[in-house]
Image (cartoon, grey):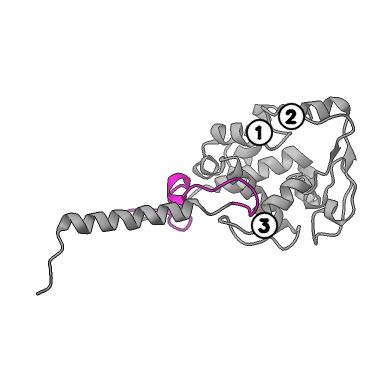
Amino acid sequence: MARSVSPLAIAAIVAAVLLWSRRAQASVPINPGIDVYLPPSDEWWPAPDSGGEIVTGDETTSTPDYTGAFLYMIQVAETGQNAVRSGDAYRMLYGGALFDDLSDHPANLGWPGVRLSDSMCRAAGFGPGCVSTAAGAFQIIRPTWDRVRRAGAWGPLLPDFSPESQDEAARRILIECRALPYVESGNFDAALRLASTQWASLPGSVARQGPKSYETVLALYQSALGVA
């Protein structure tokens, strides 16, 4: 005769399987070889929306594109409104010159970067003679690009330095600094505080590279959302 299994035993088995699954998720590295780990997605990712629409009774309204507005704000703060409007932002080197080869980050294709002043180097935690390799619409430096372009829990390998890859790289930087959940939920102030640790143009940055005022970046963000 088969032995019956008690409800308590079944509950214990289910709990053990769930615990194993969560630990397996937590052990997936953001980047191979980097000692940084992505928490299980259900612990800090916002709940998925309904495909960009909110349905209430018989009414359907589009949700605001908070992420698009936030990325637009960073682009303009880093490269200027004219560059963003023309599309040149995606081809802009630190200092304002433009590049044409989007097959990889310019510094990986031979661009030596731009030497910073000693005061900027000190503010960034480097010694005199440091160099900035910031490039593209989000002015991403080479070490950051090489890290976030890799495949991981956040998505596949980024194949090039195209506008699409730059946008995705910026999203991954927001993941690293834990700003993305706030960005996606429209919590501008919380997202800005965290993002300012990554972008020198944002208010709150200590890089001493002419950060924009809070009022300026808020106005850019609101204009992208269509808020008067």
Give the residue number, with chain letter if any, for mark 3: 150
Q: Report the Cα–Cα distance between label 2 and label 1.
A: 9 Å
Give the residue number, with chain letter if any, for mark 1: 196
Q: Report the Cα–Cα distance between label 2 and label 3.
A: 29 Å
* Mark nearer the N terminus (2 vs 3): 3
In the image, residue 127 lies at what x, y percent? 84, 29
In the image, residue 65 lies at what x, y percent? 55, 48
**Residue 54 inside the magenta-drawn segment:** yes
Above or below residue 165? Residue 117 is above
Quarter holding the C terminus is: top right
- Residue numbers of the magenta segment: 30-58
Q: Report the Cα–Cα distance between label 1 and label 3.
A: 23 Å
In the image, residue 181 lies at what x, y percent? 51, 43
Q: Residue at x 67, y 51 (%)?
A: 148
* Contact? badges 2 and 1 (CB < 8 Å): yes
**Residue 97 inside the magenta-drawn segment:** no
> From where the camera sits, is residue 113 visible?
yes
The secondary structure type at the circle numbered 2 is loop
Three-letter amino acid code of the residue under disc 2: Pro
